[in-house]
């Protein structure tokens, strides 16, 4: 379980992202990973190296989010904590990586859904992937 971010993972997701986990946008289910044991599974399904982000998650440096359709994972996103307020609460999140299977750039429906999800959750797009 991710302990390094801030408090209980589900509370963190509601307070920082502004919506509960497993939200839907344009037919895709968005999920923010709260257990690092999910990363190798996601990595195998998307053929990427997301499993190597476990330590960064545990240290509170990043969040990993996915988007899935009815069949399988379609998108993997790395979100970094870019700012904290005076009380140490997360105040700014940046999307620094957003790629599909085999680390391919997103197009069409996937691209549109990810743009909408980041906007709905006050995540600043800070990458050239999307």
Image (spheres, rainbow, N blue to C red):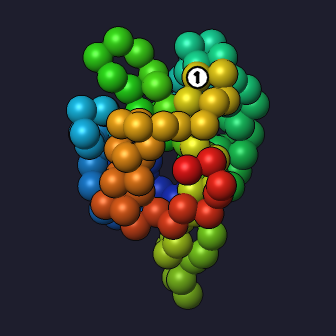
Where is residue 62 drawn, in percent x and y? 63, 51
Q: Residue at x 58, y 22 (%)?
A: 101
Q: Alpha-carbon neighbours of circle 1 within 10 Å: few (<14), some, or many (≥20)? A: some
The vertical placement of 33 against 12, above or below, is above
Q: Please name whichever residue, 93 or 46, is drawn nearer the observer in this view of the structure.
A: 46
Q: Is residue 82 visible?
A: yes
Specify whether 31 is left or right of 5. left
Q: Is residue 2 visible?
A: no
Q: Residue furthest bottom?
A: 86
The vertical placement of 48 against 128, above or below, is above
Displayed quadrant of residue 50: top right
Q: Please name whichever residue, 93 or 90, is drawn nearer the observer in this view of the structure.
A: 93
Residue position for label 1: 101
The vertical placement of 38 against 22, above or below, is above
The vertical placement of 27 against 20, above or below, is above
Q: Residue at x 55, y 50 (%)?
A: 130
Q: Residue at x 50, y 75 (%)?
A: 91
Where is residue 106 drawn, in percent x and y? 53, 37
Where is residue 10 drawn, in percent x and y? 36, 47
Q: Secondary structure at mark 1?
A: helix
Q: Residue at x 55, y 87 (%)?
A: 86
Where is residue 126 drawn, in percent x and y? 62, 63
Displayed quadrant of residue 58: top right
């Amino acid at each position: 379980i991710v302990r390094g971010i801030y408090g209980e993972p589900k509370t963190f997701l509601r307070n920082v992202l502004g919506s509960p986990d497993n939200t839907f946008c344009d037919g895709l289910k968005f999920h923010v990973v709260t257990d690092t044991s999910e990363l190798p599974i996601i990595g195998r399904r998307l053929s990427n190296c997301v499993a190597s982000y476990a330590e960064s998650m545990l240290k509170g440096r990043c969040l990993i989010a996915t988007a899935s359709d009815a069949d399988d994972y379609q998108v993997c996103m790395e979100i970094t904590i870019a700012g904290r307020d005076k009380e140490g609460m997360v105040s700014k999140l940046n999307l620094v990586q957003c790629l599909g299977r085999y680390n391919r750039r997103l197009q069409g429906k996937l691209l549109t859904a990810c743009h909408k999800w980041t906007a709905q959750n006050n995540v600043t797009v800070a990458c050239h992937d999307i």
